[in-house]
Structures are given as C-alpha cells and as structure tokens.
Amino acid sequence: MRYTLHNLYTMKFASIFLLLLFWSSSSLIGQSPLGKWKTIDDKTGIEKSIVTITEKDGKLFCHVSEILDEEFKGTDPVCEPCKGAKKNQPIVGLEIFWDMEHDKGNKWEGGKILDPENGKIYGCKLEVESENKLKVRGFLGFAALGRNQYWYRVAE
C-alpha cells in the first residue's frame, strides 16, 4: 500500500479520534457510586436527604444519613408505613436500598429500594451518569415500568 501525505493525516486523525472516544467513554467505566449523595424528589424537586452508599461483600447498600426536607427539620421521623423490621424505625439510619450487584461498567442492579414515604419496596437499578450524578430507577416487576430519581454527589 502506498501512503500519501493525505492518507497519513487521515490515519493520524482517526487514531486521535478513537483514542479520545475511548478515553471519554472509559472515564465513566468503573466509577463508583460509593459515598454520600443528595436525594432530590423527582416529582417536587425538593432536596430530601443525604444518603450514604457503602459496599459489603461486593454488594451496595444505602442508608439515610441526614434529612434535608424542611418539613421534617428538628424532628426524628420514623417509617410508619414500613413493614417488618423496618416498621417505626427512625428514617435517619434506615437502610433504603440493599443487595445491589455490579452489572457492567457503571451499572448496578438486582437489589431492592424502599420508599420510606409509603413503605413500599421496589426493584432497583443504579447508573453512574457522571462523576457527580447517579440515576436511581425504582420499578415494579419490569424496569420499563418505573421512575427515575437523580442523586448528586456531596463533597466529603
């Protein structure tokens, strides 16, 4: 194959483009959701809480660290509608998702998430959308039949 100056520039440009594409897409791969996140109500836009995501035995768990919602400031609300061992437990410290398993790249699934407002438990998926933004999807049965919340990383 005979290389012309044009061919060499084209190959150099393509190589740089592929390298940048790989670098930008791989920057999210393996990003961890571990740490503190601010939750935002997807219906009202109100900041609800600070939660902490931890890992144990390769699975992710999340508990409420602090309540931000002005309606509950200065109180110690409990999960009245919850069932079983979570019933009437304080919201602060309450585990709200558990058993999330790493799927691939920046996604986790297979766990459950609790809505303390109604006591219901849903299937859950997580996806790190950027270093500071986490998509949390709760659903009944099929992931297509659910809703998303976006959580934002809190500097520690």
Image (tube, rainbow, N blue to C red):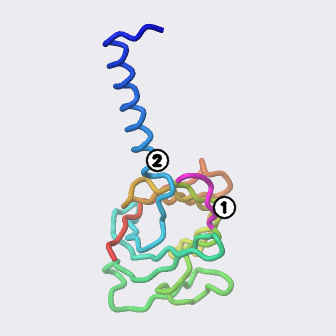
Residue type at numbered disc 2? Ser
Q: Position of residue 130 (x, y in %)?
A: 39, 54
Which one is in front in this view, the residue at disc 2 or the one at disc 1? 2
* Up-down relation of residue 87 to residue 129 (above or below): below
Could you tell whether 115 is left or right of 15 in the image? right
Q: Position of residue 5 (x, y in %)?
A: 31, 13
Q: Quadrant of residue 59?
A: bottom right
Residue type at numbered disc 1? Gly
Considering only order in the chain, which callout, 1 or 2, is on the residue closer to the N terminus? 2
Q: Quadrant of residue 103?
A: bottom right
* Up-down relation of residue 74 to residue 70 (above or below): below
Could you tell whether 69 is left or right of 28 in the image? left
* Up-down relation of residue 18 to residue 153 (above or below): above
Residue at left offset 38%, top offset 81%? 67
Residue at left offset 34%, top offset 77%? 156
**Residue behind mark 2:** 26
Could you tell whether 139 is left or right of 8 in the image? right
Q: Position of residue 149 (x, y in %)?
A: 45, 60
Residue 121 colored in magenta in the image: no
Distance from Cα at disc 2 to Cα at disc 1: 23 Å
**Residue behind mark 1:** 110
Q: Residues within 10 Å of mark 1 (few under 14, many from 20)?
A: some
Q: Position of residue 23 (x, y in %)?
A: 41, 44
Q: Which residues are magenta?
A: 100-105
Residue extending farthest front = 2
Residue at left offset 40%, top offset 69%? 39
Q: Nearer the viewer, residue 126 or 54?
A: 54
Q: Residues within 10 Å of mark 2 (few under 14, many from 20)?
A: few
